[in-house]
């Protein structure tokens, strides 16, 4: 038994999901003739109360498309210093859109309205790049699955409106936040110009992301997705997995959150762990005693078939997910308790 906790992307499609995929009606989606893709896009748009949606092969491509459609080369994108769009998309904001990133020094990947106000520059000074777009992430990945306070997001939106800025949500794990904070997709649909969500993270689909936006922006996104090489053919087989995920795998995220909290409690109780960050969703970040060392700890857990990820600066990450069973949970808890220098 391998206990793979490196990410919530490691899940395999369940029998039910595979059946939905096998039974999907498909067509050529480049000609908008795949009924299952169309159904998924309509379902997502309705869920969020947004005008339209577009299916993507990855969250990175959905985010990069959003950045491209909101900006011109030379513009400024404002995000937290932990942002996925800045740190983990290969420098795509610069490569694809020619934009510069203004990084805010936030807390666990989140910042305040006051910090945003400070980062926005006016248009009168010819030296300064145009502020055009604000990107936020919920939950935050590098921030350890932290969730934004919705009232702070409302304040951010007000600032974006006052300054004529687009507002994008990288919602790769938005459903984890919705479930943890008892919020609705519609609340978020009202706040943002564009939202990306991942079907392939906690929701357990093998592939797929969705960009939500106005009809006008989706027309632009269609063209950008084509030029990025992301227009796909009989992709309804994958969209069917996405529909299945939205129907069956949202509420159960609370189970992942519960297990994460239990793991956090164990880590907080053992002497070799020096710090556990606050756990709000399915990501746990902790530090082990320097005498043990991060790499050594990860290596020793690997010899017990437990896979964890180093996150830099002494941080170790555990991510719970759909395929992390009760049996695995018991074994992990036991191994963590019994681990000794
Ligand atoms: C995973 C993730 C993405 C998208 O990643 P892909 O691997 O390209 O699907 C975007 N943002 C965040 C915060 C993520 O965790």
Image: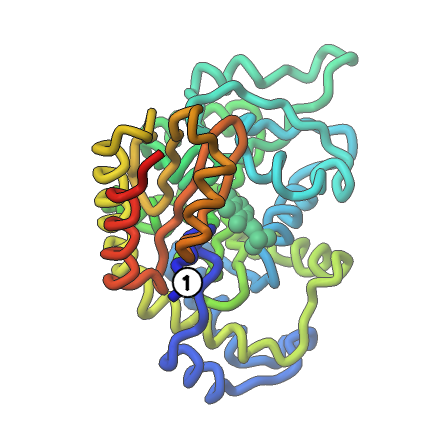
* Residue 229 placement (x, y as % from top left): 75, 62
Q: Closer to the camera, 82 or 317? A: 317
Q: Quadrant of the N terminus?
A: bottom left
- Report which quarter residue 155 is drawn in: top left
Q: Secondary structure at mark 1?
A: loop
Residue at image coords 59%, 27%: 78
- Look at the image and tell me whether residue 93 can be seen: yes
The answer to whether residue 227 is above or below residue 107 is below
Q: Which residue is identified by label 1? A: 2
Q: Quadrant of the C terminus?
A: top left
* Residue 114 placement (x, y as % from top left): 44, 15
- Look at the image and tell me whether residue 157 can be seen: no
The answer to whether residue 101 is above or below residue 228 is above
Please state the total of marks drawn on the protein image.
1
Residue at image coords 30%, 60%: 328
Q: Closer to the camera, 128 or 7? A: 7
* Residue 51 placement (x, y as % from top left): 48, 57
Residue at image coords 35%, 36%: 147
The answer to whether residue 275 is above or below residue 114 is below
């Amino acid at each position: 038994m391998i206990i793979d906790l490196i990410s919530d992307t490691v899940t395999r499609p369940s029998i039910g999901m595979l059946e939905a995929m096998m039974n999907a009606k498909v067509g050529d989606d480049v000609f908008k003739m795949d009924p299952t893709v169309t159904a998924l896009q309509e379902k997502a748009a309705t869920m969020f109360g947004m005008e339209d949606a577009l299916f993507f092969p990855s969250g990175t491509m959905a985010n990069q498309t959003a950045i491209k459609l909101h900006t011109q080369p030379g513009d400024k994108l404002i995000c937290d210093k932990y942002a996925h769009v800045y740190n983990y998309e290969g420098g795509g904001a610069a490569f694809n859109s020619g934009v510069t990133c203004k990084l805010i020094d936030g807390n666990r990947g989140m910042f305040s309205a006051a910090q945003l106000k400070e980062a926005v520059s006016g248009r009168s000074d010819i030296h300064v790049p145009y502020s055009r777009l604000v990107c936020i992430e919920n939950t935050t990945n590098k921030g350890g699955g932290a969730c934004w306070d919705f009232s702070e997001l409302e304040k951010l939106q007000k600032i974006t409106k006052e300054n004529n800025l687009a507002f994008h949500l990288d919602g790769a794990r938005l459903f984890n936040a919705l479930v943890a904070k008892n919020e609705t997709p519609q609340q978020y649909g009202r706040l943002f110009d564009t939202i990306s969500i991942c079907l392939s993270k906690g929701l357990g689909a093998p592939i797929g992301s969705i960009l939500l936006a106005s009809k006008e922006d989706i027309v632009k996104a269609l063209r950008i997705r084509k030029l990025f090489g992301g227009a796909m053919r009989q992709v309804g087989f994958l969209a069917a997995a996405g529909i299945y995920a939205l129907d069956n795998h949202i509420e159960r995220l609370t189970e992942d959150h519960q297990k994460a909290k239990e793991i956090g409690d164990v880590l907080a109780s053992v002497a070799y762990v020096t710090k556990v960050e606050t756990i709000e969703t399915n990501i746990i970040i902790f530090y082990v005693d320097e005498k043990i060392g991060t790499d050594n700890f990860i290596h020793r857990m690997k010899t017990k078939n437990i896979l964890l990820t180093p996150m830099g600066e002494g941080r170790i990450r555990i991510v719970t997910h759909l395929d992390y069973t009760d049996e695995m949970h018991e074994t992990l808890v036991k191994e963590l308790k019994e681990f000794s220098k």
